[in-house]
Every structure is written in C-alpha cells, then in structure tokens.
Amino acid sequence: MSASAKPCVFCAIAAGELSAGVVARTAETVAFLDQRPVFPGHVLVVPRAHVADLDAADDRLLSGLVVEARRVGRAVQRAVGSDGTLVLVNNKVSQSVPHLHVHVVPRRRGDGLRGFLWPRHRYATDGERDAVAARIAAALRDGGDGVAPVEN
C-alpha cells in the first residue's frame, strides 16, 4: 500500500484492530454488524484477505463467502425473528468500502423497505429483452472468464 493509500477498514476489522460487533469468525471470513444498518441485525460478511470487489475474487473464496453468508443469514433470522433476509453484494458502484462484502439484511413482511433495488421497469418489447440477453450471452462466450453460456 502506498503512503497516500487509505488503510482498509474491513482489513482492520478482520485483523481485530477495530471493534465492529463481530458475530462470527472463520479461517477465511469475518462477519460483523453494519455500522449503518438498514434494520437491526444487518451483518456484513467479508473475506479476511483483502479483495477489492467481486471481480477480483477467485471461485474458492466466493464459495466460502456465500456459504458463510447463508449460515449468518440463518442465524440473523433466528436472532432477530425476521421472516427472511436480503443478501446482496454491491460490485464497484455503491461499494462504500473497496473490500468485497456481502450484506445480510433481516427482512419482515411489510417492513416498509422500498426503493432499495427499485424502480424496476419491464423491457419495452420481447425483442428488446432478447437483444439484451443475446449481448450478455455473447459476452459470456467471448469474455474468456470460464463461464459457460446458457443453453436454450
């Protein structure tokens, strides 16, 4: 890290250098309460290793991170009595800390959460939808990222 680079707050939490309401630690991850929760019990699950975003993570790390997010989500539901959870990852845009993290947000039916992932809009036509699908499928085939295209 250069002298002008800002230290990563999530790395400091993972190293135990900052207090953060830690709820779980594994060899690969740390889970702690979000300092500005959507609802009480909102947890962030982060890899211990500094990984800037979803694109920088390898498959093994992602697998462990998602399994831990599921485990934490089940515990959050029991602990706060929620009906379920919203589990999401911001990737670059809206990622306030440049360290990969999974949000586990407790949800209740009728909890009033609106506008978090909205507004949503239908495609104007089936043709527009199909053209977008074709561009994404082509990028998967040609991108060299090892992701197989969806077979129709």
Image (tube, grey):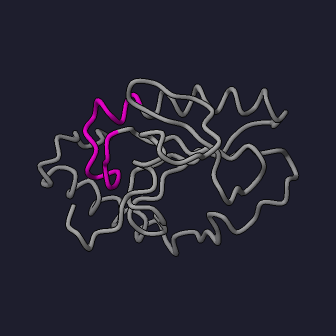
On-image quarter of the C terminus: top left
Residue shown at 81% from the left, 37% from the top = 82
Residue 12 spot, x, y in % from top left: 43, 48
Residue under the point 32% across and 33% down: 61
**Quick one: quadrant of the N terminus?**
bottom left
Where are the magenta residues, as a range?
49-64
Q: Quadrant of residue 60?
A: top left
**Looking at the picture, how far across and down is residue 113, in whole percent?**
77, 60
Magenta residue check for 57: yes
Relative height, residue 103 to residue 115 (above, below)? above
All told, the count of numbered labels is: 0
Residue lying farthest right?
A: 110
Height in image: 78 above or below 98?
A: above
Image vertical order of residue 75 relative to residue 135, above or below: above
Q: Position of residue 11 (x, y in %)?
A: 40, 48
Work out whether 149 lies above or below 38: above
Viewer-nearest residue: 120 or 10: 10
Q: Is residue 16 magenta?
A: no
Q: Tell which of 82 and 114 is nearer to you.
A: 82
> In the image, 7: left or right of 118?
left
Q: Is residue 22 left or right of residue 63?
A: right
Res 130 → quadrant: bottom left
Residue 20 in picture, x, y percent from top left: 60, 46
Which residue: 25% across, 50% down?
A: 56
Q: Nearer the viewer, residue 138 or 145?
A: 145
